[in-house]
Amino acid sequence: MFNLATLAVVGYVAERALGPARWVVLYAAGAAAGEVTGYLLNDPGAGNSIAVCGLAGGGALALSALERSVGARYAVMVGFSAFAGSTLGAIVMVAGCAAAVLLVVHRDRVPASALAAAPLVVGLALAAVPDLHGPALLGGLIAGWVTNGMFPSTPRSAPLA
Protein backbone atom coordinates (compact mmCIF):
# COMPACT_ATOMS: atom_id res chain seq x y z
CA MET A 1 0.00 0.00 0.00
CA PHE A 2 2.86 2.37 0.81
CA ASN A 3 4.41 1.87 -2.64
CA LEU A 4 1.11 2.61 -4.40
CA ALA A 5 0.48 5.72 -2.30
CA THR A 6 4.01 6.91 -3.01
CA LEU A 7 3.57 6.22 -6.72
CA ALA A 8 0.36 8.29 -6.64
CA VAL A 9 2.15 11.29 -5.11
CA VAL A 10 5.56 11.12 -6.80
CA GLY A 11 4.01 9.97 -10.08
CA TYR A 12 1.47 12.78 -10.12
CA VAL A 13 4.06 15.44 -9.36
CA ALA A 14 6.48 14.04 -11.96
CA GLU A 15 3.80 13.80 -14.65
CA ARG A 16 2.65 17.38 -14.04
CA ALA A 17 6.20 18.70 -14.13
CA LEU A 18 7.71 16.60 -16.88
CA GLY A 19 4.80 15.50 -19.05
CA PRO A 20 3.59 11.98 -19.83
CA ALA A 21 6.37 11.04 -22.28
CA ARG A 22 9.20 11.78 -19.86
CA TRP A 23 7.20 10.15 -17.06
CA VAL A 24 7.13 6.87 -18.96
CA VAL A 25 10.84 7.09 -19.80
CA LEU A 26 11.84 7.79 -16.19
CA TYR A 27 9.54 5.11 -14.77
CA ALA A 28 10.93 2.55 -17.23
CA ALA A 29 14.53 3.65 -16.59
CA GLY A 30 14.16 3.09 -12.84
CA ALA A 31 12.47 -0.27 -13.35
CA ALA A 32 15.04 -1.44 -15.89
CA ALA A 33 18.06 -0.32 -13.87
CA GLY A 34 16.71 -1.94 -10.70
CA GLU A 35 15.66 -5.20 -12.33
CA VAL A 36 18.88 -5.62 -14.33
CA THR A 37 20.85 -5.06 -11.12
CA GLY A 38 18.58 -7.53 -9.35
CA TYR A 39 19.27 -10.21 -11.92
CA LEU A 40 23.01 -9.49 -11.81
CA LEU A 41 22.96 -9.84 -8.01
CA ASN A 42 20.63 -12.87 -8.06
CA ASP A 43 17.91 -10.83 -6.32
CA PRO A 44 15.18 -10.10 -8.93
CA GLY A 45 11.65 -8.87 -8.35
CA ALA A 46 11.88 -5.51 -6.62
CA GLY A 47 8.43 -4.20 -7.59
CA ASN A 48 7.28 -0.69 -8.36
CA SER A 49 9.42 1.02 -5.72
CA ILE A 50 12.41 0.89 -8.07
CA ALA A 51 10.33 2.41 -10.87
CA VAL A 52 9.31 5.22 -8.51
CA CYS A 53 13.03 5.72 -7.84
CA GLY A 54 13.39 6.46 -11.54
CA LEU A 55 10.69 9.12 -11.27
CA ALA A 56 12.32 10.58 -8.16
CA GLY A 57 15.78 10.66 -9.72
CA GLY A 58 14.53 12.34 -12.88
CA GLY A 59 12.16 14.58 -10.94
CA ALA A 60 15.10 15.96 -8.95
CA LEU A 61 16.24 17.56 -12.23
CA ALA A 62 12.88 19.25 -12.93
CA LEU A 63 12.53 22.98 -13.47
CA SER A 64 10.27 23.69 -10.50
CA ALA A 65 11.53 23.63 -6.93
CA LEU A 66 8.49 21.62 -5.80
CA GLU A 67 9.17 18.74 -8.18
CA ARG A 68 12.90 18.77 -7.40
CA SER A 69 12.19 18.70 -3.67
CA VAL A 70 9.67 15.83 -3.95
CA GLY A 71 12.20 13.80 -5.93
CA ALA A 72 14.96 14.53 -3.43
CA ARG A 73 12.67 13.73 -0.49
CA TYR A 74 11.78 10.32 -1.89
CA ALA A 75 15.45 9.55 -2.53
CA VAL A 76 16.34 10.45 1.05
CA MET A 77 13.45 8.33 2.37
CA VAL A 78 14.66 5.35 0.34
CA GLY A 79 18.15 5.85 1.72
CA PHE A 80 16.92 5.89 5.30
CA SER A 81 14.77 2.81 4.71
CA ALA A 82 18.00 0.79 4.43
CA PHE A 83 18.33 1.23 8.21
CA ALA A 84 14.99 -0.43 9.03
CA GLY A 85 16.46 -3.84 9.96
CA SER A 86 16.41 -3.27 13.74
CA THR A 87 14.50 -1.24 16.31
CA LEU A 88 17.19 1.43 16.42
CA GLY A 89 17.33 1.36 12.63
CA ALA A 90 13.58 1.85 12.44
CA ILE A 91 13.85 4.87 14.73
CA VAL A 92 16.63 6.30 12.55
CA MET A 93 14.50 5.64 9.45
CA VAL A 94 11.42 7.40 10.87
CA ALA A 95 13.50 10.38 12.04
CA GLY A 96 15.27 10.60 8.68
CA CYS A 97 12.01 10.38 6.74
CA ALA A 98 10.49 13.10 8.91
CA ALA A 99 13.55 15.27 8.32
CA ALA A 100 13.23 14.65 4.57
CA VAL A 101 9.88 16.46 4.68
CA LEU A 102 11.90 19.61 5.36
CA LEU A 103 13.30 19.33 1.83
CA VAL A 104 9.81 19.99 0.51
CA VAL A 105 8.71 22.50 3.14
CA HIS A 106 11.88 24.61 2.82
CA ARG A 107 12.47 23.96 -0.89
CA ASP A 108 13.01 27.66 -1.65
CA ARG A 109 15.95 27.75 0.78
CA VAL A 110 17.64 24.63 -0.59
CA PRO A 111 19.89 25.11 -3.64
CA ALA A 112 18.73 23.28 -6.78
CA SER A 113 22.09 21.53 -6.96
CA ALA A 114 21.58 20.06 -3.48
CA LEU A 115 18.16 18.72 -4.45
CA ALA A 116 19.69 17.05 -7.52
CA ALA A 117 22.64 15.78 -5.47
CA ALA A 118 20.43 13.95 -2.96
CA PRO A 119 19.38 11.16 -5.37
CA LEU A 120 22.96 10.94 -6.65
CA VAL A 121 24.48 10.51 -3.17
CA VAL A 122 21.75 8.14 -1.98
CA GLY A 123 21.88 6.19 -5.26
CA LEU A 124 25.65 5.70 -5.03
CA ALA A 125 25.44 4.73 -1.35
CA LEU A 126 22.66 2.20 -1.94
CA ALA A 127 24.43 0.78 -5.00
CA ALA A 128 27.49 0.16 -2.81
CA VAL A 129 25.44 -1.70 -0.15
CA PRO A 130 24.04 -3.26 -2.65
CA ASP A 131 20.40 -2.26 -2.67
CA LEU A 132 18.39 -2.31 -5.92
CA HIS A 133 16.97 1.15 -5.23
CA GLY A 134 20.42 2.72 -5.71
CA PRO A 135 20.85 1.78 -9.37
CA ALA A 136 17.19 2.68 -9.95
CA LEU A 137 17.75 6.21 -8.59
CA LEU A 138 20.88 6.53 -10.72
CA GLY A 139 18.98 5.24 -13.76
CA GLY A 140 16.32 7.90 -13.21
CA LEU A 141 18.95 10.62 -12.86
CA ILE A 142 20.68 9.54 -16.05
CA ALA A 143 17.39 9.26 -17.95
CA GLY A 144 16.32 12.67 -16.60
CA TRP A 145 19.58 14.25 -17.70
CA VAL A 146 19.41 12.64 -21.17
CA THR A 147 15.75 13.55 -21.70
CA ASN A 148 16.17 17.17 -20.61
CA GLY A 149 17.07 18.04 -24.20
CA MET A 150 14.71 15.56 -25.87
CA PHE A 151 11.37 16.77 -24.56
CA PRO A 152 9.95 20.27 -24.27
CA SER A 153 10.71 21.92 -20.94
CA THR A 154 7.13 23.08 -20.52
CA PRO A 155 4.91 20.63 -18.66
CA ARG A 156 1.66 19.34 -20.12
CA SER A 157 -0.33 21.12 -17.43
CA ALA A 158 0.12 24.07 -15.09
CA PRO A 159 2.94 23.79 -12.55
CA LEU A 160 2.10 22.97 -8.96
CA ALA A 161 4.20 25.74 -7.41
Image (cartoon, rainbow, N blue to C red):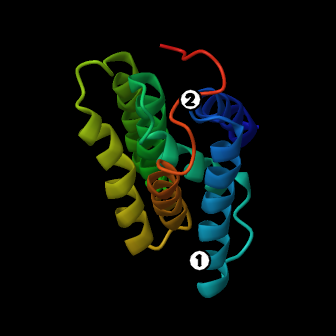
Which corner quadrant of the image does residue 63 belong to? top left
The amino acid type, in three-letter code, at marker 1 is Thr
The amino acid type, in three-letter code, at marker 2 is Ala
Location of residue 5 in the rendering, given as x and y in whole percent from the top left corner = 71, 32
Q: CA distance from mark 1 to mark 2?
A: 28 Å
| SS class, disc 2 | helix
Residue 87 visible to an observer of this rendering: no
Q: Residue at x 45, y 46 (%)?
A: 75
Q: Residues within 10 Å of mark 2 (few under 14, many from 20)?
A: many
In front here: 67 or 87?
67
Residue 147 visible to an observer of this rendering: yes
The label shown at residue 17 is 2
Which corner quadrant of the image does residue 104 belong to? top left
Task: Find out whether the residues at labels 1 and 2 contact each other: C-beta distance under 8 Å.
Answer: no
In front here: 158 or 92?
158
121 w.r.t. 148: above or below: below
The label shown at residue 37 is 1
